[in-house]
Image (cartoon, rainbow, N blue to C red):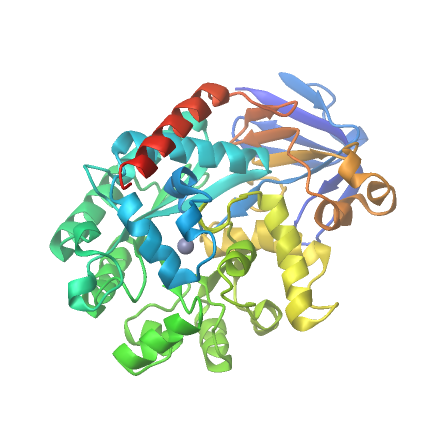
Amino acid sequence: MSTLLLKNADVVVTMDAGRREIRGGSVFIRDHVIEAVGQAADLPQSAGEVIDLAGHVLMPGLINTHHHMYQSLTRVIPAAQDAELFDWLSALYPVWAGLTPEMIQVSTQVAMAELILSGCTTSSDHLYIYPNGCRLDDSIEAAVGIGMRFTACRGSMSVGRSQGGLPPDAVVEQEDAILRDTRRLIETWHDASSHSMLQIAVAPCSPFSVSRDLMRESAALARSYGVRLHTHLAENFKDVDYSREKFGMTPAEYAESLGWTGHDVWHAHCVQLDAAGIALFARSHTGVAHCPCSNMRLASGIAPVPQMLAAGVPVGLGVDGSASNDGAHMLGEARQALLLARVGHGPAALSARQALEMATLGGARVLGREDIGALAPGMSADCVAFPLGDVGLAGGAVHDPVAALVFCTPPRAAWSVINGRVIVREGRLTSIDLPEVQRRHDVLARGLANAVR
Ligand SMILES: [Zn+2]
């Protein structure tokens, strides 16, 4: 058995039932589980490894509920820099058609490295395009290699342009093949146990790229295995118009009509969710992945997050794909959530601590996890420490070190422990050779873009 003591943090943000913030606190970890949290003097003073966190805030690892990691290869592509969602997608689909299994693996590791260094310890990823032999297993192997807790979403697209959908026919799959592969992935990889490092979710891409049948059958398949459901919903006005024209319903009504509401469902964006939709989501405990940077980047709008929270909708944060939020910083996303909520809904719309709660407990709830998102005995040992000496926090850390993490320029994590393993040590990733992976990534990114020129 191995033990790890994280001691003497200036503040331990627990996110426990009492939302305690402990000055001069420590966390004691045995193997992959937290055993004790409290004042440094009240905890064991020694362990297999002891890390002194004076000058740091220690908190639960942040949780990212929506991403498309392969898009790290296609950041800032000039043709997609200044477009809204549908034009942005139409510019990028032909590039993504050139993806290979190696590209999925390498881009997933780069995206995860970036997230981990920004304080994230658990992420979901939504892979919905499978050209040239790509498989979700490529993402999963990347996650296992880097040591990140992972919810891998088996995305899909089945309605191509010739059938009235948005994606080109060349990048859609047959529906029976999608369902067969989804079943294989759940049976091969899904681990429902406590402290699981890997779960599978069923995730048709969006109402404008799959059929009603696939939405219905995906829900039935997911529920037969007890796994979660994920898709994009009500992202912008065009998305709502498409739903009204094609289905004669709002996106929320459409989701409900297909069985896509419930405690085991989370939808990305929901920027244009109306009041009836918010009430429906609250009633049915349907979750939302709020992605403020992407919503701003694509000019999708301002999500009604304060209204959702007030109604009791589970809301987590998502950085979204690297091509619609070209800077995936999980703590930065919490900051943008606070700022955007205030632009839309006034200065009291969201506090710093509410933003941090969305990034931890909110994310855990949305991903259906009761074992992450808080520092308390029995929880998975996922903790991050942010340095208060960072010049971006100067002054702010003196007055309120916890709020400073959200109001000031977001620092990188100095330490990250995932499932009891030290993955970031003094600001450096320990599990992969990041400079080498990044070098390969940029060669692949260039090749992918050049292939369509
Ligand atoms: Zn997305």
When the figure is inspected, residue 384 is found, relative to residue 309, above or below; the finding is above
Residue under the point 19% across and 60% down: 160
| Number of residue marks | 0
- Percent coordinates x, y for residue 234 in the rendering: 42, 69
Which is nearer the eye, 427 or 96? 96
- Image quadrant, ligand 1: bottom left
Q: Is residue 265 visible?
A: no
Q: Judge by depth and name the residue closer to the eye, 344 or 7.
A: 344
Q: Residue at x 43, y 39 (%)?
A: 72
- Toward the top, the furthest residue is 48
Q: Is residue 46 visible?
A: yes
Q: Quadrant of residue 286?
A: bottom left
User: In the drawing, does residue 268 fall left or right of residue 311?
Assistant: left
In this view, the residue in front, 271 or 161, is 161
Q: Which residue: 64% across, 70% down? A: 344
- The answer to whether 309 appears left or right of 262 in the picture is right
Residue 145's image quarter? Answer: top left
Query: Residue 348's x, y, as percent?
Result: 74, 68
Q: Is residue 106 left or right of residue 422?
A: left
Position above or below: 102 against 85 = above
Between residue 224 and residue 129, name the one nearer to us.
129
Against 101, residue 86 (above or below) is below
Measuring 27% from the left and 41% from the top, which residue is drawn there? Answer: 452
Residue 200: x and y in percent read: 33, 46
Quadrant in which the C terminus is drawn: top left
Q: Position of residue 297 (x, y in %)?
A: 52, 56
The reply, left or right, for residue 382 in relation to residue 247 is right
